[in-house]
Amino acid sequence: MKKIADKSKYKPRVIDATVKKYLSAFGAVCIEGPKWCGKTWTSSFHSNSEFLIGDPSNNFQNRSLAEMSPSLVLEGETPRLLDEWQEVPAIWDAVRYTVDQRADKGQFILTGSSTPKRKGILHSGAGRVEKLRMRTMSLYESGESSGEVSLEDLCNGKLKSVLTGEVDLRDLAYYTVRGGFPGNLNAAPEDAFLLLQSYLDAILDDDSQRIDNKKYDTNKMRLLLRSLARNESTTATKKKLLNDIKENDDETIDDDTITTYLDVFNRLFLIDNQPPFSTNIRSSVRVKQAEKRHFCDPSLACALLKATPDRLIGDLNTFGFMFEALVERDLKVYAESFGANLFHYQDYNNKEIDAVIELSDGRWCAFEIKLGANQIDKAAESLIELKNNILKNGGIAPSVLCVICGMSNAAYIRPDGVFVVPITALKN
């Protein structure tokens, strides 16, 4: 049987090592993430047989077969790929049961581009099926980062100073607008825009209508998406989103509708918010608990705002927010590969940290994200001031301070101990 993934053409992903690790530890692995991020190709690469539930051949014959006999479609060489399992939720329990019966590791790889409500799914799969979140391609995966600096080493206080080369602002704008969807990597800016518009249309017109078998108002969904784009990389509340829609689009949406649609976007993996951090600071300073809002890829926010590379360069304030989203997408991909997690910090003294990486041993690292090299000094001063303030208030200070920069041509350690790293030199 011909497989989807041609191993000779497969572009390695950071998540590959984690997939191998989980297959050796669990009976099944479920890889979740937004449509078009590469889940099926990666899963096919790691599998020995596959069953594609969403295959439209013969009037969706595979889906009908899975609905009639979920256990039958599990037969095949392992690991066996079951693509888009959420189309037939009974597959989940069939996998869990079969894993229990076989009592062996690495039996199945499930992929899902939406999360169904758990009605009708009898068991969580705990201990049998382990979930993995896959994201769009980082700059290292797409080939735009040299990978000269390891984030894991950086978080352990190791950085060797190195010249990383000049960076063109226009290139950074293109990477942001194009995004990390594998199918968009070689697209011209105008083509990338069209593909992303088509992607959003498909999500709204098709996926959002099928996830709960309800008819949602796609016009209001689009209004909310545009508001999220205008508030990318901020901690905007639902009230702020509602007011933003009223001010910019002269429309109104009630609070319950916003809550419902945000839940749908979340279960479609269209949004990927950054949670707040405070657990290991233990400072007397009160910390805010608002999530920082992000799309699963900054290109979607750009598409909704009709932001071309030229328009971003002409509006550096907006570019700054979109660049921050690009960097934080990459930091998530890299950090999760070595068991760390990404957060942000914001307290009631108006002090913020763009990105916080918490390591598995409890240490944490603070990152400021800046587009221009002329902003490095101020960012470093802010990190040092905040570290001193946390210590003053009895908290646990970050073990590493770092500025991630767009236009820096070197990775180095400043005399004050703050690391500086270009995003185009970073890897996991």
Image: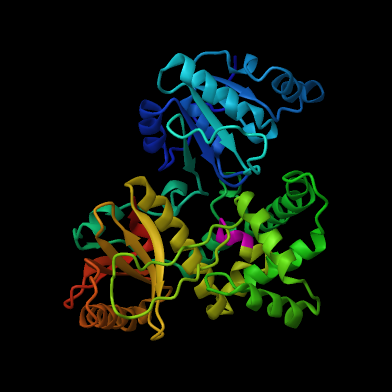
Q: Find residue 68 and report its image quarter.
A: top right
Identify the residue shown where x is 37% and y is 55%. Answer: 341
Coloration of the structure image = rainbow
**Above or below — where is 112 with respect to 303?**
above
In this view of the protein, which residue sits in the foreground, 374 or 396? 396
Majority secondary structure in the magenta region:
helix
**Above or below — where is 227 with respect to 334?**
below
What number of labels is visible?
0
Query: From the image, which quarter does the N terminus lie in?
Result: top right
From this viewpoint, is residue 420 visible?
Answer: yes
Q: Find residue 374 and report its image quarter.
A: bottom left
In this view of the protein, which residue sits in the foreground, 2 or 113? 113
The residue positioned farthest toward the bottom in the image shown: 349
Identify the residue shown where x is 59% and y is 29%. Answer: 92
Identify the residue shown where x is 69% and y is 79%. Answer: 244
Identify the residue shown where x is 51% and y is 48%. Answer: 135
Residue 99 screen position, x and y as percent: 48, 21
Residue 112 screen position, x and y as percent: 60, 38
Q: Is residue 266 left or right of residue 382?
A: right
In this view of the protein, which residue sits in the foreground, 259 or 195? 259
From this viewpoint, is residue 78 visible?
Answer: no
Residue 375 screen position, x and y as percent: 37, 81
What span is colored magenta in the figure? 296-300
Residue 17 within the magenta-colored segment of the rendering: no
Residue 272 screen position, x and y as percent: 54, 57
In this view of the protein, which residue sits in the foreground, 92 or 76? 92
**Above or below — where is 341 with respect to 101?**
below
